[in-house]
Image: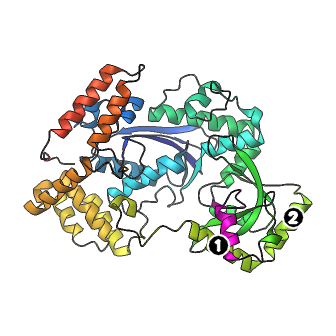
């Protein structure tokens, strides 16, 4: 299987409410030799205010956000989706990608009505995260890499410091293609310097193999990092799966806890083991390539505890209910923004067929398709897209509804603070950056002028994809 190393630069740090502005990728063979590279950019979607912080970090200039020579956000997602099909089957790899880049890419597919939002996991594709691999190297083969530190002597695990520290001297940090090159470089060090470790990490791409490893009930090692401290290894064993979510496995910490005290305990004690501190039972997302390793010579006491758990199916079932309760998604909560409804259910076959047509037709037909969709989320997102790129086909009332939506987004109240950038939060960011002596004041002037120009628009010009 080949690999796709990729990175995304964005309008901000919210995976739900910001968007990609740049997508870069290097497609490699199994041995990490480059086959092909791409570097794609796009315009900003009409409803998004870019974070001044993001623009200063990435160096993306305001004029690029509205450059008509670049594809629209809608066209951009079509181009990326085509790559996921053309390169399949492949392992999609990034640096902290499972927690950020992939979530943002999935939102891009969702908000632009792609039939499948899980493209990096379907059609034979799977995923891997080099940040997880870096944590595993720290715990299992620390001498393989050189480790940068901050002024207080604490180890830094960031890409823009790790890659140069280990000899990658051409790193263009905060450019998507530069970050891809740096990520691939680190992966090559790990794969060549410790093939056994790399092989184990690669094997964990497959959730079935992860579950098979867990379901032996043998003690295993799990590498995790929490907060600002260093990564550390935990020795534990399988302890059930979350009720209603087979990809969420329970991991009993055999060093911290003793199952004898919990097997016959009440539900409150089990929930405390799952949710309290120290945490005795953790959850593992088996479909997110965890850093999970077999132990060749497990401790006898650990084996004894694991055997107790293996012989207690009722206990594992109760743990599964406690894990599910901890991750309760609040289905009875007030209606959340459409972006936060992304995991509200899979699309029907009929809707998927309509979405496939939606991607291939013109905006007149797209406007018709929206009314045929059964999923209310897709209807709302579809109306938004037509308002962005095909406003000639909207009625007067639909245009008014769209402009009301834009106004509510741009001028949302600061209490509670919205998860997206508003004009007021952007203004505060400009003031904050202005006060920092290292800030490029000329670049900030351009950003401030761009925001003022956005705010001056009372209505939105017609734009076509």
Report the residue marked by disc 2. 303
Looking at the rendering, which quadrant does residue 295 occupy?
Answer: bottom right
User: Is residue 273 magenta-colored?
Assistant: yes
Q: Give coordinates of residue 275: x percent, y percent.
A: 64, 62
How packed mark 1 is, by other alpha carbons closer than 10 Å (few <14, some 14-19, many 20 or more), is many
Tell me the residue at 36%/21% (across/down).
Answer: 440
The stretch in magenta equals: 263-284
Q: Give coordinates of residue 6: x percent, y percent.
A: 49, 42
Q: How much space separates mark 2 and mark 1, taking CA atoms?
A: 21 Å
User: Is residue 231 magenta-colored?
Assistant: no
Tell me the residue at 35%/34% (across/down).
Answer: 429
Lower position in the chain sequence, tag 2 or tag 1: 2
- The residue sitting at the right extreme is 300
How packed mark 2 is, by other alpha carbons closer than 10 Å (few <14, some 14-19, many 20 or more), is some
Q: Secondary structure at mark 1?
A: helix
Report the residue marked by disc 1. 320
Colour convention of the picture: rainbow
Give above or below for 135 relative to 168. Answer: below
């Amino acid at each position: 299987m080949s690999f796709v190393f990729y990175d995304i630069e964005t309008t901000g740090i919210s995976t739900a409410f910001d968007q990609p502005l740049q997508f870069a990728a290097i497609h490699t063979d199994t041995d990490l030799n480059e086959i092909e590279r791409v570097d794609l950019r796009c315009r900003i979607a009409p409803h998004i205010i870019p974070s001044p912080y993001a623009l200063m970090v990435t160096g993306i200039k305001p004029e690029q956000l509205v450059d008509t020579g670049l594809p629209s956000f809608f066209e951009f997602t079509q181009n990326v989706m085509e790559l996921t099909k053309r390169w399949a089957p492949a392992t999609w790899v990034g640096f902290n990608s499972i927690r950020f880049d992939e979530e943002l890419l999935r939102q891009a597919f969702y908000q632009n009505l792609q039939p499948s939002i899980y493209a990096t996991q379907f059609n034979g594709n799977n995923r891997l995260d080099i940040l997880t691999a870096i944590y595993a190297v720290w715990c299992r083969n620390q001498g393989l890499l050189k480790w940068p530190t901050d002024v207080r002597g604490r180890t830094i695990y960031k890409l823009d410091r790790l890659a140069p520290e280990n000899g990658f001297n051409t790193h263009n940090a905060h450019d998507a293609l530069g970050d891809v090159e740096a990520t691939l470089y680190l992966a090559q060090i790990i794969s060549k310097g410790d093939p056994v470790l790399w092989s184990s990490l690669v094997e964990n791409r497959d959730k079935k193999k992860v579950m098979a490893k867990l379901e032996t009930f043998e003690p295993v090692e799990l590498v995790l990092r929490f907060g600002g401290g260093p990564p550390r290894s935990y020795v534990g064993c399988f302890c059930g799966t979350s009720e209603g979510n087979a990809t969420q496995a329970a991991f009993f910490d055999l060093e911290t806890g003793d199952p004898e005290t919990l097997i016959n305990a009440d539900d409150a004690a089990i929930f405390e083991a799952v949710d309290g501190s120290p945490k005795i039972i953790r959850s593992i997302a088996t479909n997110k390539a965890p850093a999970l390793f077999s132990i060749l010579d497990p401790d006898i006491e650990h084996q004894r505890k694991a055997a107790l758990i293996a012989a207690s199916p009722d206990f594992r079932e109760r743990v599964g209910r406690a894990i599910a309760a901890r991750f309760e998604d609040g289905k009875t909560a007030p209606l959340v923004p459409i972006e936060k409804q992304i995991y509200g259910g899979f699309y029907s076959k009929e809707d998927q067929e309509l979405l496939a047509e939606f991607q291939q037709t013109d905006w007149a037909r797209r406007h018709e398709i929206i009314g045929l969709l059964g999923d209310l989320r897709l209807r709302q997102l579809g109306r938004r897209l037509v308002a962005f790129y095909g406003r000639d086909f909207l009625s007067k009332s639909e245009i008014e509804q769209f402009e009301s939506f834009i106004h509510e987004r741009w001028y949302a109240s600061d209490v509670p603070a919205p998860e997206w950038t508003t004009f007021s939060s952007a203004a505060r960011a400009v003031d904050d950056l202005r006060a920092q002596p290292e800030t490029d004041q000329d670049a900030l002037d351009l950003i401030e002028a761009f925001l003022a120009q956005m705010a001056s628009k009372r209505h939105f010009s017609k734009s076509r994809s």
